[in-house]
Amino acid sequence: MDARFIPEPVHLIRFAPELLLTVFATLIMVLDPLTKEGEKHRLGILALVGLLAAAWGAAVAAANPGTAFSDMLLVDGFATFFRYLSILVGVLTLACSFAYLKREQADSGEYYALLLFSIAGQCVMVSANELIMIFIGLEISSIASYVLAGYLRDDKRNNESALKYFLLGSFATAFLLYGIAWIYGITGSTNLAEIQRVLSNRDIAPSVNLIGASAALMFVGFAFKVSAAPFQVWAPDVYQGAPAPVSAFLSAGPKAAAFAIFLRVYITAFEPIADQWQAVLWASALATMIVGNFAALLQSNIKRLLAYSSIAHAGYVLVAVTTHSQIGTAAAMFYLAAYAFMNVGAFAVVTHFARQGERYVNIEDLAGLGQRQPVTAALLSIFLLSFIGVPLTAGFFGKFYIFKAALDANLVWLTVLGLLNSAVAAYYYLRIIVVMYFHEPSESVADLQSPAPGIQAVLWASAAATLILGVFPSWVLDFAGKAALK
Amino acid sequence: MPSTYPEQYFPILLQVLLGVVVAAALVGLSFLVGKRVKNKVKDTPYECGVNPIGSAKERFSVKFYLVAMLFILFDIEAIFLYPWAVVYRDLKLFAFIEMFLFIILILSGFFYIWKKGVLDWQLEDEQTFQQKKQVLK
Amino acid sequence: MPSSVPLSWYLILSAILFGLGVAGFVVRRNIITVFMSIELMLNAVNLSFIAFSYQLRQVDGHIFSFFVMVVAAAEAAVGLAIILTVFKNRATLAIDDVSSLKN
């Protein structure tokens, strides 16, 4: 036994965002009982400081790329991209949450601590270079999210959301873990590069069927986490029942991180067996798009509609994963960033509009918003148009790059069917815009106050990001292209 | 040295047989030889000598659950001490610092639950408890 | 050293346990039982890890199962707390009764 397990200082620097997030989250948890009722929002500000510190940590870590802790962690451009994305989603969620928690009179340090823990888990996930680290990061993120989904414990909808998220999430994790156990047994390692090496060596490559079965088990786990068909059933219930800011967070942060590990595992470790999994992903991507878009057509609850739309968008990203090319990975990264902004923005409008107890969550309740609050309505329209993929919005370039990557990879049918799907999707997004501008104002908009400062900041920031990515996509795409896994 | 499966597992088979025989003998003998007494005291459930009060199917206070849950959490954390103890001598000061940080994290969790009043065991419904006792007497 | 139980026996046992867990998750209607099925699945995975670890003459698999156990405990704590809040608000543990979220 030698001292090679003792990490060098640079290893700690590469792990800086996670360390900072954990320190701040623990600090908030310890300070919570010492803070008076009514002053808890200060802990939220501390959480904001923590997130900014973590962003700084991610920048410092990015300046020192490499592996850490006996190759368990890998800080590369890919990890840095998703670390930034997770932290950014966290900042936006936090800004939305101040007004929400005040309105529901449920301000507490736990909310902020759980948010930070979840983001810490996501950061571990995206920089993991090893299956067990992926599992641990996924669980840190998930367990915190389960509690967040059921944050208002006296609210029946919150309870149900948390219960379903928890049961189905743990079920999926067990599948993922069983797949990991088999991969470990077959290849003798959980390191992604080592697994790739073993699998690509045809002489020593063990039984193809066994590897395929383990990859399939892991696919079940990943598909659950990214809400891909046929494992998407939990998403509508969870997003509908959870507090609106938490729904925003769940459908942007953990989902992006889950896609990050999905990409990393399938593009590095399972690249040698791509022929086997490509067909499965092809079918899943198509099914996800169809289920998401067609079910969204029938929804009258806007949170549920956004949940189905989130499933459909996961389908588009899966198209990019199916290509398993560098350009496809870059397209997926760009799309996840674009989707995070427009989705958090849309949920911020819902947070604002639903009011206390989330009474107004039906699409018809939005009637007359265009006259009553033209600015909010206009910002929501930007997000909806971006969901559709109208030019000059981030959604357009997101879809454009994904389908371009799909065509480059000769996935013609998937591209055609995907484009048809996004045409169907235009219907239900436009319906919301029509209701907002052309329907008679309902009593629900009569007493609507102007959005709280935090929500306003989120709306403007997300709208700005959506438009900037739509006009200057190369700013993010170049970064993604360089960072994309080869 | 036993080499085949049946040979290897013969001791286990013996053990199983012995267990069955002893158990059957104890139950069977007391059934055959023992004297039977039937009265009310004999039929009450054995509660370590204390007279049972009320039905056993009553719902327990959530405090029991909380303490049980916390016990499991802190108990499981101790699992990490085993691998740590194995490599402690090789890693020296580093191992000490690592475990120190780990314990600090656990203690901050402990501080949290303590301040939140989870460890407070006073019966907030003392009255209802007394009433229940009265009724059962 | 006498030849030990072959690896495949452990793996078959582990697969059976995992299958029982999946079946329990799908079939059972009590939330606590459903939750216990998940724990059974995790323990089946642990068995696989340890069997593989022994076969490969590595200690890694043992450490993995430690992590799985710790995560399972954390999951149990959070899960039971969630189940408790559901029970408090609905006074039922039948999974079919927890279905108010619909369009």
Image (cartoon, coloured by chain):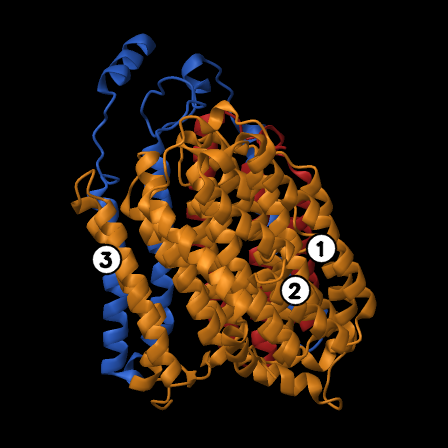
Q: In x, y percent, where is residue A336?
A: 55, 64
In the picture of the structure, the residue carrying the numbered disc 1 is A422
Q: CA distance from mark 1 to mark 2?
A: 9 Å
CB atoms at circles 3 and 1 under 8 Å apart? no
Q: CA distance from mark 2 to mark 3?
A: 41 Å
Name the subunit of mark 2: A
- Residue at left 51%, top 20%? B36
Nearer to me, B25 or A401: A401
Amino acid identity at mark 1: Ser
Badge 2 and badge 3 both on one subunit: yes
- Residue at left 20%, top 38%? A37
Amino acid identity at mark 3: Leu
Q: Is residue B120 above or below residue B110?
A: above
- Residue A66, by quadrant, is bottom left
Q: In x, y percent, where is residue A409?
A: 76, 77
* Chain C, chosen colour in render: red
* Chain B, chosen colour in render: blue
Q: CA distance from mark 3 to mark 1?
A: 45 Å
Q: Is residue A207 left or right of residue A49?
A: right
In the picture of the structure, the residue carrying the numbered disc 2 is A399
Nearer to me, A136 or A141: A141
